[in-house]
Amino acid sequence: MITLNNQAPPPAPTARAPASPLRRIWRRFTPILVGLSALALSASACALTSKSDPILPRYFSPERSDAIAKPGFAAGGVGAELRIGTISAASHLDERMVFRDSTFELGYYQEKRWTEAPEEYLRRRLERALFEERGLRHVVGGAAPMLVVELTAFEEIRKPKRIARVQVTVRLQDARLVRWEQTLTVDSPVATSSDDEWENEMVEAVGVALVSVVNQIADRVTKELEPQVAATPENPKKAGP
């Protein structure tokens, strides 16, 4: 007896489509990419685990430790009254020393720092020049003319020649008006000697510029306030008009 097989014959094998050129390139370079990735990871791990020398900052101060205030007013005199207002600094000025190589770009010495914020040096020098050396009376409360100062430059300029620059914006005001307002800039040359001493020379130049600009402020403030001093037996010629 003959039986019929109703099952369909198996399909004929079809030809496999050739790989695209992009896939062939990918297969060829995959081992190379894997090797480069492993090498990059290994280098990163070495960089993270290796020990590098830490940055140890050095601290400098433009104030001379042997500086002594020299009173320049007559003993027993009556000075004008003055109140110290806000003494501030531009936002880029902090304990890091600033250098400038062009008009529009500045940088920081990461390993060279000031011992304090620069505006603190300015405040101390102003108080010494005004109250100790010129004899003005320091008002801490109540109505009195007020001095407001902003420090806008406290830096080393390296090109075209090395100088130290200190710049301030000053305002002397009372309850009614501003009596004097001006921007003052002092540049002090940095002495050139051995590379081992340039930090001290730069700091010294900044200190010279700071003293100079403060003396300009103190002289002008004293002149502006001089007519306010009331006539007294000790100061008969100090009366205002």
Image: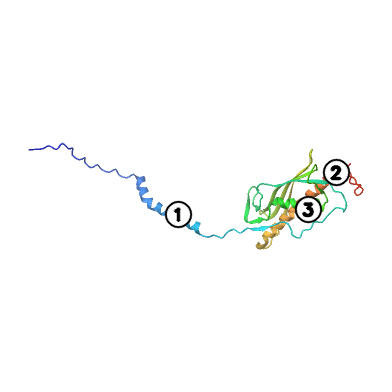
Q: Which residue is mark 2?
A: 228
Question: Disc 3 or disc 1, which is closer to the eye?
Answer: 3
- Measure the C-alpha gap from mark 2 to mark 1: 75 Å
Residue 26: x and y in percent read: 37, 48
Give the colour scheme of this rendering: rainbow
Residue position marked by numbered label 3 in the rendering: 128
Residue located beneath label 1 in the image: 41
Query: What x and y, as percent, mark residue 55?
Result: 59, 58
- Residue 26 in view here: yes
Which amino acid, mark 3? Arg
Question: Distance of mark 3 from mark 2, alpha carbons?
Answer: 21 Å
Q: Amino acid at mark 2?
A: Gln
- Residue displayed at 76% across by 53% down: 211
Disc 1 marks which amino acid? Answer: Leu
Give the vertical position of 39 relative to 104 (above or below).
Answer: below
> In the rendered image, is residue 186 in sight?
no
Which mark, residue 83? Answer: none
